[in-house]
C-alpha cells in the first residue's frame, strides 16, 4: 500500500530533530509498503532551503521525500511563525495532490494547520485519513500562555474536536493522549497508542564518545548532557541556575546540545552568570546522537512545571534510555512513571535547581549506581519501547485502516 504523510518538520537521520516518522516509514517499506512524505523545504533548525530527497541514495527504496515551499520566518516571532505554517499548509496541499495514487493519507500535529491539508487530500483522493496527535493542541498553547484570548481558545478547541471527528483513525504517542481523545467523545476503538520509542541498535551503551568528549569537556569531568530544543517550554534557565550552584565543582560540566528560539538569550544569560561549566554545542544530526550520548555520564530532561507537560513522552528520554545513561528527570507525570519503572534515573521537581544540582553530585559520587541505572534503562527500553516492534504495529494499523476505508 502507498501512504502519503504530510509533515512539515519531518527529519532524516542526517538532520537534527526527532526521527520517529523516518524510522517507522523506513521499516514499513521493508514490509512492502510505499511512503511519500511532503515536508517543508526549510530546515527547521538551520533555516536553510532543502531540495526534494526523492531518489536520495540515503533513503530506503520505497520512501521518497518531497519538499513544499515554506517562508523562512519560523523563528521571527509568533505571527511570522503562524504565517510559515499557513503557507506550508497551502503548498503541501498542492504537492500532496500531485503525489500520485495513494491508499491512505496521514497528517500529524502539531502544527495543526498541516492536518487540514492531509484531511482535504484524503477526501479528494477518496481514501482514509489517519490523524496522529503528538502533542495536545491547543491545550499546550493555553497552559504555556501562548494562547490566552477566550474567543481564540473556544475556536481552537472547536477546531480540534472537528478534526478528531473527521479522522478515520487517530494515533497518539502517549497513554494520556488516548484517554484525552476518548474523553472528547471519540470511540475507543478509533484511537491507537503507538508510543514514542527508539531504535536501540542506534546506540552503544559501551561506547565512550571520545572525540565529542575531548572537544567539549576537560579530562576527567563528569558530563551532564541535555539534548533537545532550547525553547520556551524546555526550562533551560533551571539548568543554568543548577550550574551556577556547581561553580565550585569544576569536575562537573553541562552540555546543552541543541538549538532553538531561546538559544541566544540563554547564552547571554549563561555569560552574565559567569558559567564556565556550561557548553552550548549547537544542534547535532540524529545520526550523531550516538556519540554525543556515549560521551555523557548522565543525561538531563527538563520541562516547565505546567500540568499538560505531565502528559507527554519526550523523545529525548527514550534516546537516553537506549544509550544506557542514567537520567536526571525534571518532568513529572507519565514519563516519570517510565523512568522509575525502569529504575533508570533520578526525579527532581520541575523548576527546582537546588534538587537538580544535588542529583548531579549524587550521581557523580556513585558511578557504580549510575552505571547500574543506565543498564536498567537500556534493558527496559529494549523490552517495552523498541521501534522495531512499534513499526510492525504501525504497518498493521495502516493496512487495517486502509482496508476498512
Image (spheres, grey):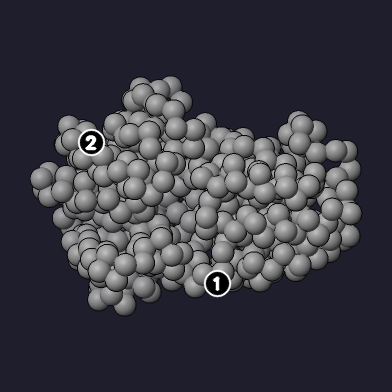
Residue 213, given in percent of the width and then of the height, sits at 77, 37
Residue beneath label 1, please? 333
Question: What residue does disc 2 label?
Answer: 91
**Lower sequence index among marks 1 and 2:** 2
Report x, y in % for residue 245.
Answer: 81, 59
- Element type where label 2 sits in the image: helix
In which quadrant of the rendered view does residue 29 lie?
Answer: top left
Element type where label 1 sits in the image: loop
What residue appears at the point 29 percent right and 71 percent down from the top-left corner? 150
Residue at the outermost front position = 272
**Circle 2: is it few (<14), some (14-19), or many (20+) Cα within 10 Å?**
some
Which one is nearer the viewer's eye here, 67 or 259? 259
Q: On the picture, is 377 further left or further right than 175?
A: right
Percent x, y for residue 243? Answer: 77, 55
**What number is the disc on residue 323?**
none
Q: Is residue 99 left or right of residue 364?
A: left
In the image, residue 368 sits, relative to residue 10, either above or below, namely below
Kindly identify the residue that appears in the image at 63 percent across and 55 percent down.
236
- 49 to the left or right of 297: left
Left or right: 215 with respect to 85? right
Closer to the eye: label 1 or 2: 2
Q: Identify the image quadrant of the N terminus.
A: top left
How packed mark 1 is, by other alpha carbons closer than 10 Å (few <14, some 14-19, many 20 or more), is some
Location of the C terminus by quadrant is bottom left
- The residue that appears at 25% across and 76% down in the rendered structure is 185
Q: Is residue 152 above or below residue 198?
A: below
Q: Picture quarter containing residue 177?
A: bottom left
- Estimate the spatial distance between the alpha carbons at disc 1 and disc 2, rounded to whole Å: 38 Å
Amino acid at each position: 500500500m502507498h501512504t502519503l504523510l504530510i509533515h512539515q518538520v519531518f527529519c532524516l537521520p542526517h538532520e537534527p530533530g526527532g526521527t520517529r516518522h523516518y524510522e517507522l516509514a523506513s521499516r514499513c517499506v521493508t514490509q512492502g509498503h510505499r511512503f511519500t512524505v511532503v515536508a517543508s523545504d526549510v530546515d527547521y533548525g538551520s533555516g536553510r532551503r532543502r531540495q526534494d530527497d526523492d531518489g536520495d541514495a540515503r533513503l530506503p527504496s520505497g520512501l521518497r521525500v518531497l519538499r513544499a515551499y515554506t517562508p523562512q520566518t519560523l523563528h521571527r516571532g509568533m505571527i511570522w511563525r503562524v504565517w510559515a505554517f499557513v503557507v506550508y499548509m497551502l503548498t503541501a496541499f498542492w504537492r500532496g495532490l500531485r503525489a500520485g495514487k495513494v491508499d491512505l493519507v496521514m497528517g500529524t500535529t502539531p502544527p495543526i494547520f498541516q492536518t487540514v491539508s492531509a484531511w482535504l487530500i484524503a477526501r479528494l483522493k477518496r481514501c482514509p485519513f489517519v490523524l496522529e496527535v503528538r502533542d495536545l493542541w491547543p491545550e499546550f498553547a493555553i497552559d504555556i500562555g501562548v494562547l490566552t484570548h477566550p474567543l481564540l481558545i473556544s475556536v481552537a478547541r472547536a477546531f480540534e474536536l472537528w478534526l478528531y471527528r473527521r479522522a478515520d483513525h487517530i494515533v497518539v504517542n502517549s497513554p494520556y493522549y488516548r484517554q484525552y481523545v476518548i474523553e472528547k467523545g471519540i470511540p475507543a476503538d478509533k484511537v491507537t497508542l503507538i508510543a514514542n520509542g527508539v531504535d536501540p541498535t542506534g546506540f552503544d551503551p559501551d561506547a565512550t564518545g571520545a572525540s565529542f568528549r575531548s572537544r567539549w569537556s576537560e579530562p576527567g569531568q563528569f558530563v551532564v548532557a541535555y539534548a533537545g530544543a532550547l525553547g520556551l517550554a524546555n526550562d533551560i534557565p533551571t539548568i543554568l541556575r543548577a550550574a551556577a550552584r556547581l561553580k565550585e565543582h569544576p569536575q562537573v560540566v553541562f552540555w546543552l546540545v541543541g538549538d532553538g528560539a531561546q538559544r541566544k538569550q540563554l547564552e547571554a544569560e549563561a555569560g552574565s552568570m559567569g558559567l564556565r561549566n556550561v557548553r552550548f554545542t549547537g544542534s547535532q544530526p540524529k545520526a550523531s546522537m550516538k556519540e554525543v550520548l556515549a560521551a555523557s555520564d548522565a543525561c538531563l530532561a527538563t520541562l516547565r512545571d505546567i500540568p499538560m507537560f505531565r502528559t507527554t513522552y519526550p523523545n529525548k528520554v527514550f534516546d537516553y534510555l537506549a544509550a544506557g545513561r542514567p537520567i536526571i528527570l525534571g518532568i513529572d507525570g507519565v514519563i516519570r512513571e517510565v523512568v522509575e519503572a525502569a529504575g533508570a534515573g533520578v526525579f527532581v521537581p520541575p523548576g527546582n535547581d537546588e534538587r537538580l544540582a544535588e542529583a548531579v553530585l549524587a550521581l557523580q559520587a556513585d558511578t557504580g549506581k549510575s552505571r547500574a541505572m543506565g543498564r536498567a534503562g537500556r534493558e527496559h527500553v529494549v523490552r517495552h519501547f523498541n521501534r522495531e516492534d512499534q513499526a510492525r504495529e504501525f504497518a498493521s494499523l495502516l493496512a487495517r485502516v486502509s482496508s476498512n476505508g
